[in-house]
Image: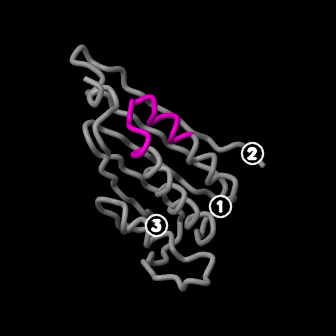
Amino acid sequence: MPLPTHTTTPVPPTPVGIRDIALRLTMSFAPHARRVEQTRRAAGALLRQGDMGDEAVETVQLLISEIVTNAVVHGGGDRVRFSLSYDRPDTVRIEVDDRSPARVAVRRAGVDEESGRGMFLVAALARSWGRRGTRTWCTVAVNTPREARTT
């Protein structure tokens, strides 16, 4: 299976400091279950470069897992396109294009069901979320960077 294509674009800090940094990650890959964890890890590594707090990174990674899993399992194309952007000071945007025109819905899975909670978690943890065409997106409010908490 070919490796996913991806790009990362850290924008260097201006003389004002690290708070002015913008981070971007884009990936395109064939829908496969192992891509979920690879996407999670790549996004986590990039966000930690931006000095984001661990709790915020873990929340973003959880939402990535849920949305990318939906794309891999229910998508309609031969590629999944993922993008993440973090423009200081407080918002991460996640977008996943699965080429499926199907509507995405929040549902309440039964206690005994092993799946079906993904979009429920996205709706609960994201600042906002939606679907435009074949793209599912969400924004995540993130906490103050570690450097600001220690000063």
Within the magenta stretch, is there residue 55? yes
In the picture of the structure, the residue carrying the numbered disc 1 is 78
Look at the picture and state if 113 lies above or below 32.
below
**CA separation, marks 1 and 2?**
13 Å
Q: Secondary structure at mark 2?
A: loop
Q: Quadrant of residue 124?
A: bottom left
The residue identified by callout 2 is: 2
Of the numbered discs 1 and 2, the one sitting upstream in the chain is: 2
Which residue position holds label 3?
Answer: 134
Q: Position of residue 84 (x, y in %)?
A: 43, 45
Q: Amino acid at mark 2?
A: Pro
Judged from the image, the secondary structure of the residue bearing numbered disc 1 is: loop
Q: Quadrant of residue 131?
A: bottom left
- Cβ atoms under marks 2 and 3 closer than 8 Å: no
**Residue 125 sits in quarter:** bottom left
Residue farthest toward the top in the current orientation of the protein:
15
Q: Earlier in the sequence, mark 1 or mark 3?
A: 1
Disc 1/disc 3 C-alpha distance (Å): 13 Å
The main secondary structure of the magenta stretch is helix
> x, y percentage for residue 46?
48, 34
Q: Nearer the viewer, residue 48 or 28?
A: 48
Three-letter amino acid code at disc 1?
Answer: Asp
Q: Is residue 141 above or below residue 70?
A: above
Q: Please name the amino acid that badge 3 sits on.
A: Thr
Q: Which residues are magenta?
A: 42-56
Residue drawn at x 28%, y 31% as measured from the top left:
149
**Farthest residue in the front direction?**
150
| Scheme of image coloration | one colour
